[in-house]
Image (cartoon, grey):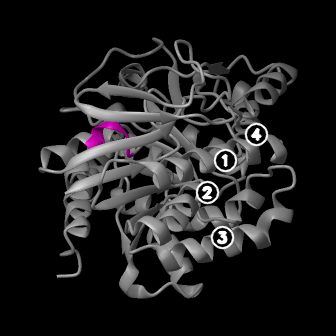
Amino acid sequence: MRILYLTQWFEPEPHVIKGLKFARALQAAGHQVTVVTGFPNYPSGRLYPGYRLKPVQRERIDGVTVIRLPLYPSHDMSSLRRSLNYLSFFVSVLAYLLIRRERFDRAYVYHPPITVGLAAAIAGLVRRLPFILDVQDLWPDTLAATGMAGGRRLTRPVGWLCAFVYRRAAAIVTQSEGICSALAARGVPARKLVTIHNWAEAEPNSVGQATPLVPQRFVVVYGGNLGLAQGLGTVLEAAARLKTLRPEVLIRLYGDGVEAASLRARAQALDLGNLEIHPPVGKDEINAVFARADALLVHLADHPLWSITVPSKIQAYLATGRPIAAGIAGEAARLLAESGAALVAPPSDPAALAGAIAALADTPAGARRRMGLKGRSYYLRHLAFQQGVYRTLRLLDGTHLA
C-alpha cells in the first residue's frame, strides 16, 4: 500500500511519538511511505539550524522519503502567531495534495493540529484519497485548556472544523480510551473509532544498574515540554517544601516550551537550589539521564481535559524501568496505579507531590528497583511499540475489527 503520512511535526523535532521509527515500521511491513511535514521549529518556534524556508524540500532519512513544506515558524502563546503557524502549513498541505503527481492509496494524518486533517478532508473531496486521523489531543478543548491567548474565542469555529474532519475520516485513532469516549459522545460513530495507546520514543533493550546522576543526592528527573498543560509551577512549589525538609532531594527538569523562561525566573525568586532547569537534549541522552535517575517525575495541571489523556512521557518512563512520582488524575493515574511503578498524588497539589517524592526517597533502593521493573513489565505487556504498530497495520488493512 502507498501511504502518505501527513504530520506537522517530524524529526529532528523532539518528542515525536509517531515519527521516523513509525514510518520505518510501516515500510518494513511492506508499505511505501512518504512523509509530508513542515520545516522543523518546535518547541522554540525558531527554524532549526541548517534549514531555510523554501517551497518544497525533499529528503531521505534512513530510507524514508520526507517532503518538507513551508510554514510560519512559531510556538508561543499568541493566538495570532500560533494560528499563522497552523494555517500556513494547512495551505501548504492543501496545495500539495491538490497538485501532487504521486499516487497514494491512503493517508495517515497526525492531529494536532486539526488543520492538517482539514487539508486532507478538503483535498479528499477532489482527489478521493481516504485518510485515517490520529487524534493525540482533543480539540477545541486543548486550545482553551493550554491558555493560548484567544483560545476560548476559537472554540466554536474549531469545533465545527473538527466535526467536518471526523465525518470525512475513514477511521479515527485515539491515544486514550477517554478521548475515544469523548468523541463517541460528540456523535462520532463507534465503527470509526479505535484506541491505540502511544509507545515510548526509544525503548531500552534492557534495564540494568546505572551510575547515579549525582552521588549522595536523590535525583528526580522530568523530561519533556515546559508548557502550561504540565502545570510545573506545582513542581516548583513542591521543591520549595522539600528544600529544607529533604535537602538530599534534587529535582531536574529537562526541556523547553512557552513556560521555560517564567519557570526559571520563579525558581530563582524562590531560591530553589534543589531544582535545576536544563535545556532539551536528544533522545539517546535523555534516556541515559532517565536510566541514571533515582526517580522520574510527571505532572499535569488540574483540568478535566487532562484526566482523559495519557501523556506520552508515561510510556517513556515505564519503558526505562524507574520508579515514578506523579501528580496526575484520571486515566493516566489509573494506568500508573495498575503498573505498580508509581506513587500518584492529585494534580496541582504541591504538598501531596512533595510527599510522594519524599516517600520514594525513603523507599529502600531494592524496593524502588522492583517498582521500576514492574513498570517496565507492564509497558512490555500493554504499551510496547510492536503492539501499537501491529494494531496500526491491522487498521490499515481493514482487519482491526476482526
Image quadrant in which you'd find residue 280: top right
The residue indicated by pointer 1 is 86
Among the two numbered marks 3 and 4 on one chain, the one whose residue lies closer to the N terminus: 3
The residue indicated by pointer 4 is 233
Residue 214 seen: yes
Rendering coords of residue 271 (x, y %): 81, 19
Query: Is 19 part of what is drawn in magenta?
Result: yes
Q: CA distance from mark 3 to mark 1?
A: 13 Å
User: Which residue: 75% across, 48% down?
Assistant: 83
Marks 2 and 3 close (CB-CB < 8 Å): yes
User: Relative to 269, is 22 above or below?
Assistant: below
Residue 341 seen: no
User: Which residue: 68% across, 29% down?
Assistant: 45
- 189 displayed left or right of 308: left
Out of 35 and 390, give the one closest to the viewer. 35
**Magenta segment range?**
18-23
